[in-house]
Image (cartoon, rainbow, N blue to C red):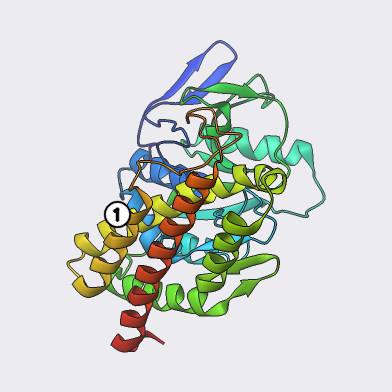
Amino acid sequence: MTDPPHPILRRGERTELSGIEGFVLCEMGNSVVGSLTRASEYFGVPEPYFELLGRSAQAFRVQIHEEFCPSSPHSACGASTLDRLFATAPVELKSILKHGDVLDEEAVRFAVVRAINSGLPMLYSSEETGLIVGYLDDGNPWICLHPYAWHPNRFEESNLPSFSVDLLRPRATPLDAEAALTDALRAGLAMWDQGAAGPYLTGRAAYNHWIDAVSITSPEVFSRLSHGAYWTFDQLKEARTAAVDYLSAHRAYPEIKREFAAVVNALQAEGRCPIEVTTPAWADKHPATPESRSRYADILATARDHDTAAFAAIRELGFA
């Protein structure tokens, strides 16, 4: 076993890793990518958040649930980008518990203790994803970092995750970053053309469904949809900002970058989504009015048109 990258802290019944930080969703809205970003920093192989969003093609996806579920921008949902993320991240995953497995609580807690004692954090997922960075006693509770704590600090978690637990370690083989970029663009175009993935709409179909909901639905119905639409709007803005940063970092495809930058400009025209009725904890309330709904639809239409131009350019460059 190699030495851990940072000291393991042992104080009484508490054992935890040092040198690994938490995050909040208004800082990194994609909890899977945010967790892997923090893990890459811990292992001394840091990659920017935008780089992982780009490589996974999450930066090039637009997706919305037909009922505007807030899960719309999650990497695992609909047209999933998880496999590409895990294949191109600077850390590797070894599954300890998969979604749908029969839970062996003792085995999972033993694996966590063993990993932490070896200086290895673990990824754990339920509705969102965080990091296991320590434990108390014999592995119950865990010491965790998770954005649903609504703060970046460590906390004790006694409930086992409902989805998955994965061991993290540095990537063993080097990545061809340029091949990853072209593959991400190809995947982004495929998701744009796909149109639907189960109850999730992608590409122009997603935009058109979204614009119709903003423009046509009754105020009562729209108020029920607005939270998921707000979060999806926020995460689309983050994704396209990452697309611009990713292409800039690789000095690639300025014509595509220009259109994605125009999407960002449209989405941040007012600095935030024009409408939100039930906001996340960090956002201001923004009531729906006829004027704000019209403005919202116009912003989405402008973003759709520039995204359409961006993916047309990707197609013309031979990525279909």
Q: Going by the image, does 156 lie left or right of 265?
A: right
* Residue in view at x 64 percent, y 71 percent: 197
* Residue farthest along the left direction in this orientation: 251
Residue at the extreme top of the image, as rendered: 12
Q: Residue at x 80, y 45 (%)?
A: 103
Which amino acid type corresponds to the residue marked 1 in the rendered image?
Asn
Q: Residues within 10 Å of mark 1 (few under 14, many from 20)?
A: some
Measured from the top left, where is residue 213 in percent x and y? 62, 58
Q: Position of residue 65 (x, y in %)?
A: 64, 59
Q: Nearer the viewer, residue 213 or 191?
A: 213
| Residue in the image at 49% along x and 74% along y | 192
Pick the front one: 283 or 118: 283
Residue 173 occupies which quadrant of the picture?
bottom left
- Nearer-the-camera pick, 285 or 197: 285
Residue 175, image x, y percentages: 33, 66
Q: Secondary structure at mark 1?
A: helix
